[in-house]
Image: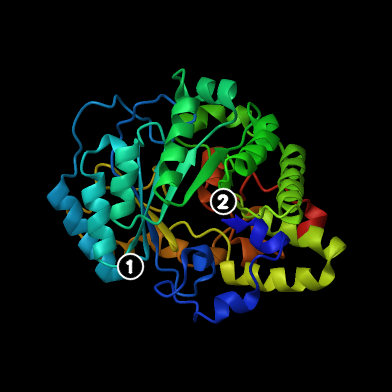
Amino acid sequence: MIGISKLYCGQVEPSDALRYGRDSGKLPSQLLQFSRDKKPVIVWNMTQRCNLRCVHCYAHAVEVEGTDPINTVQAKAMIDDLAAYGAPVMLFSGGEPLARKDLVELASHATGKGMRAVISTNGTLITKEKARELKAVGLSYVGISLDGLEEVHDRFRGVPGAFKKALEGIANCQAEGLKVGLRFTMNKRNVSEIPGIFKLLKDLNVPRACFYHLVYSGRGSELVREDLNHTETRQVLDLIMDETRSLFDAGHPKEILTVDNHADGPYVWMRLAREDPRRAEEVLALLQYNEGNNSGRGIGCISWDGKVHADQFWREHVFGNVLDRPFSGIWDDPTIELLHKLKDKKRYVGGRCAKCRFLNICGGNFRARAEAVYGDVWAQDPACYLTDEEIS
């Protein structure tokens, strides 16, 4: 994650991370990306079931009715292991996590073990009662996915009325005092909706939004032609910075992040170097704390069937299964070659990444995209939009 508001608008200073000691167990969630120990945030795709049919679903979601391979008892044992291991955050995702009747019970179990619990949802199933239950168990955050305003969103989600139901979910969370934010996956079909998303943040008083770059995975792999080209990506980053600054200067500061393309960090720094050299120096320090992409190190994924992956998008590689072996035993096993190398991937990346001056603050970007396009885990990320002159 690249904190546009944190970096570009100065909402976080280098000293903010330092004063907490930079240990993941001590840092508040908004500073977790700057942790030193990189204990993994765990994305658990707790079900493959979903009530929508999104065209860019990385989970290849199935019908909402059915059962899940990991039951409640097994899930609690998994959470116990993660908590003891020191994983600071449990992100309950899917499919649609609210398709599971035990979501609230499992979120409560995670918070009871000292973890922060958050959910990633389409928002359509968050009734007033469900929002009240989630607040009661200490849920930290609800991320609700939108792909644009009503017409575009409903077309992406494959179900008429999904947009209005998502807005109802947002309102129900806000009524209970639950922190709620928006998640937006950028591509050619919806990039024109970004100004509308910023207006929605202001009008609905939503404090946070994450703008995701497209990762070629799941049904999203079929959208590879829909990904923004390098020029378009640079333009959209400038747009996001401009919109973020506009709200900040108008007295409506929002937490704005971009996700899944760590070239965004150097791009923000280069713009600040032109506009505010003093701030640019501070941003460089924060980016060095961040260390770029953390798939297989600072983030891990457990699938609905218990399989362990480096992140929620990259399912081509399975490192083990929590139904057979605890996550803690899998994650630090030096005999799992790829997982072991991902802990220090700067030593192994090739192509433009290997000679890039920003490697220490980007971390080689997304290995999933490199493998999808070049068939080589260690190839350069094709979505890096920085020029040869900029990286040399």
Q: Disc 1 to disc 2, how far (Cα)?
A: 36 Å
Residue 170 lies, in percent from the top left, at 46, 39
Mark 1 or mark 2: which is in front? 2
Q: Residue at x 58, y 23 (%)?
A: 152
Residue 74 lies, in percent from the top left, at 15, 51
* Vertical position of residue 270 compared to residue 162: above or below: below
Q: Residue furthest left?
A: 73
User: Under tag 2, what secondary structure?
Assistant: loop
Residue 380 lies, in percent from the top left, at 62, 50
Q: Quadrant of the N terminus?
A: bottom right
So how many labels did they put on this image? 2
Whether the residues at callouts 1 and 2 have beta carbons within 8 Å, the answer is no
Residue 7 lies, in percent from the top left, at 68, 63
Q: Residue at x 56, y 65 (%)?
A: 346
> Label 2 is placed on what type of residue?
Pro
Question: Does residue 269 appear anywhere in the picture?
Answer: yes
Identify the residue under disc 1: 332
Identify the residue under disc 2: 207
**Which numbered dot is residue 209?**
none
Colour basis:
rainbow
User: Of 94 and 131, which appears nearest the observer?
Assistant: 131
Question: Does residue 392 appear anywhere in the picture?
Answer: no
| Left or right: 86, with 379 as reference point | left
Q: Residue at x 47, y 37 (%)?
A: 217
> Label 1 is placed on what type of residue?
Asp
| Left or right: 334, with 186 as reference point | left
* Vertical position of residue 312 compared to residue 285: above or below: above
User: Of 30 and 301, which appears nearest the observer?
Assistant: 30
User: Under tag 1, what secondary structure?
Assistant: loop
